[in-house]
Image (cartoon, rainbow, N blue to C red):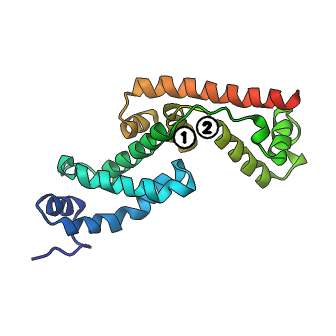
């Protein structure tokens, strides 16, 4: 007798897949596709989101025999998703010299105003936030995959050090040290960029 996909628990569906009912995996895919996409979109360039999400589900399927029935499938899947995003950056990472001149004139003006500590009332707040995010993305692109992921998780998404450590498979000490150093690197990058703008 088939267990209805709405009434079966995640652990039961995993057991079915591991026992040979490969088609049951589609239930998990449908249940968690949106959840995985939401995480991937936060960390991966738009044009690579579908590819990375697919990698997540391939890894999940391959790892099902390691899933423990007493753990939360959603949390387990989130960990696989974060680590897949991290691996994406490790694989595609190259130290790139991205000149400040690659920023648009609008971004350069915003950076000049922001670093000169001019009144925030002098330019529209929404535009300011959007430009700040784009400049942050520019700076994040110049960091290592490790620095980028820890900054995004701890400072941009608000995960605790312990949660970030679990998601990345690191010790809490490593997350603390890496997040502190990464923040300093990011600050230095943005400061250097603003000094270049003033020259």
Quadrant of the image containing the N terminus: bottom left
Tell whether label 2 touches label 1 (CB within 8 Å). yes
Q: Kindly identify the residue that appears in the image at 79 percent across and 38 percent down.
A: 101
Residue at (43%, 37%) from the top-left corner? 164
Which mark is drawn over residue 19?
none
The quarter holding residue 192 reads top right
Query: Which residue occupies the foreground of this view, 22 or 113?
Result: 22
How far from the left and from the top, in percent, is residue 46?
56, 56
In which quadrant is the C terminus drawn? Answer: top right
Left or right placement of residue 38 versus residue 111 in this view: left
* Circle 1: element type: helix
| Relative side of 127 to 136, left or right | right
Neighbourhood count class around disc 1 (C-alpha, 10 Å): few under 14, some 14–19, many 20 upward: some
- Could you give the CA–CA distance between mark 1 and mark 2, rounded to whole angstroms? 9 Å
Residue 110: give x, y in percent of width and height. Answer: 83, 43
Q: Residue at x 26, y 55 (%)?
A: 61
Q: Residue at x 37, y 30 (%)?
A: 170
Residue 140 tag number: 2
Q: Nearer the viewer, residue 15 or 23?
A: 23
The total number of labels drawn is 2
- Residue 19 position, x and y percent, is 11, 60
Q: Secondary structure at mark 2?
A: helix
Up the image or down, 100 lies above or below 71; here it is above
Residue 190 image-quadrant placement:
top right
Expressed as whole percent of the image width and height from the top left, the position of residue 163 reads 41, 39
The residue carrying pointer 2 sits among few (fewer than 14), some (14 to 19) or many (20 or more) residues within 10 Å by Cα, namely: many
Res. 120 image quadrant: top right
Residue pointed to by mark 1: 152
User: In the figure, is residue 17 to the left or right of 189?
Assistant: left
Q: Nearer the viewer, mark 1 or mark 2?
A: 2
| Up/down of 173 relative to 104, above or below | above
In the rendered structure, which disc, 1 or 2, sits on the residue that comes first in sequence?
Answer: 2
């Amino acid at each position: 007798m088939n267990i209805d996909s709405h009434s079966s628990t995640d652990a039961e569906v995993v057991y079915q897949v591991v026992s040979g009912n490969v088609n049951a995996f589609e239930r998990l895919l449908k249940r968690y596709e949106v959840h995985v996409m939401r995480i991937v979109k936060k960390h991966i360039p738009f044009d690579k989101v579908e590819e990375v999400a697919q990698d997540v589900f391939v890894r999940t399927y391959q790892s099902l025999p390691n899933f423990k029935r007493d753990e939360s499938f959603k949390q387990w899947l989130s960990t696989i998703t974060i680590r897949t995003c991290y691996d994406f950056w490790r694989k595609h990472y190259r130290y790139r010299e991205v000149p400040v001149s690659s920023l648009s004139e609008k971004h350069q003006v915003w950076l000049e105003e922001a670093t000169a500590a001019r009144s925030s009332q002098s330019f529209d707040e929404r535009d300011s936030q959007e430009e700040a995010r784009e400049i942050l993305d520019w700076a994040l692109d110049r960091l290592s995959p490790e620095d980028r992921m820890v900054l995004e998780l701890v400072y941009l998404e608000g995960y605790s050090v312990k949660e970030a450590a679990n998601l990345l498979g690191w010790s809490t000490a490593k997350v603390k040290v890496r997040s502190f150093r990464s923040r300093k690197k990011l600050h230095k990058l943005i400061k250097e960029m603003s000094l270049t703008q003033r020259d």
